[in-house]
């Protein structure tokens, strides 16, 4: 099962690659579309919101490359469990997971 928003390239009609993937995995893959913008249904939006607050709001960068470097540096400060907390995952506060489990969960 894959959650997708309704961006054109995320739909079979808008993406040849998605159509090919669906043909290859027929019956094994289910696409579930969320509304076009619904941060409660698309938890990655919660992480983007934190990134914007930490990196892009009030930045003083003159070029995109420097801003992207700032975003990358911020992302590397997050441990997998912090990512899980940012997106509201129930796994974030469960008993300690192994590093391998956290890597796959994040």
Image: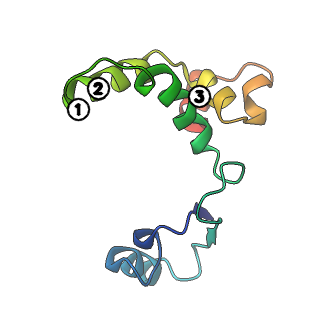
User: What residue is disc 1 on?
Assistant: 64
Residue in front for this viewpoint, 80 or 85: 85
Marks 1 & 3, CB-CB < 8 Å contact: no
| Position of residue 94 measured from the top left corner of the image (x, y, whole percent) | 80, 25
In the image, taking residue 97 as reference, residue 7 lies left or right, namely left
Quadrant in the picture for the C terminus = top right
| Position of residue 34 measured from the top left corner of the image (x, y, whole percent) | 65, 65
Quadrant in the picture for the N terminus = bottom right
Tell how many labels: 3
Marks 2 & 3, CB-CB < 8 Å contact: no
Seen in the picture, residue 28 relative to 82 is either above or below; the reply is: below
Give the distance between the C-alpha atoms of the residues marked 1 and 3, in whole angstroms: 24 Å
Seen in the picture, residue 10 relative to 78 is either above or below; the reply is: below
Seen in the picture, residue 26 relative to 10 is either above or below; the reply is: below
As helix, strand or loop, the secondary structure at mark 2 comes to helix
The label shown at residue 83 is: 3
Marks 2 & 1, CB-CB < 8 Å contact: yes
User: What residue is disc 2 on?
Assistant: 67
In which image quadrant can residue 80 be found?
A: top right
Q: Earlier in the sequence, mark 2 or mark 3?
A: 2
| Residue found 73% across the figure and 35% down from its top | 88
In the image, taking residue 56 as reference, residue 63 lies left or right, namely left
């Amino acid at each position: 099962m894959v959650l997708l928003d309704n961006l054109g390239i995320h739909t079979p009609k808008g993406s040849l690659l998605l159509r090919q993937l669906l043909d290859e995995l027929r019956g094994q893959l289910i696409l579930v579309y969320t509304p076009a913008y619904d941060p409660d249904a698309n938890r990655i939006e919660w992480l983007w919101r934190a990134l914007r607050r930490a990196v892009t709001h009030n930045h003083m960068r003159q070029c995109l490359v420097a801003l992207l470097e700032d975003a990358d540096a911020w992302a590397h400060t997050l441990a997998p469990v912090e990512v899980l907390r940012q997106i509201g995952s129930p796994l974030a506060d469960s008993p300690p997971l192994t590093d391998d489990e956290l890597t796959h969960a994040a």
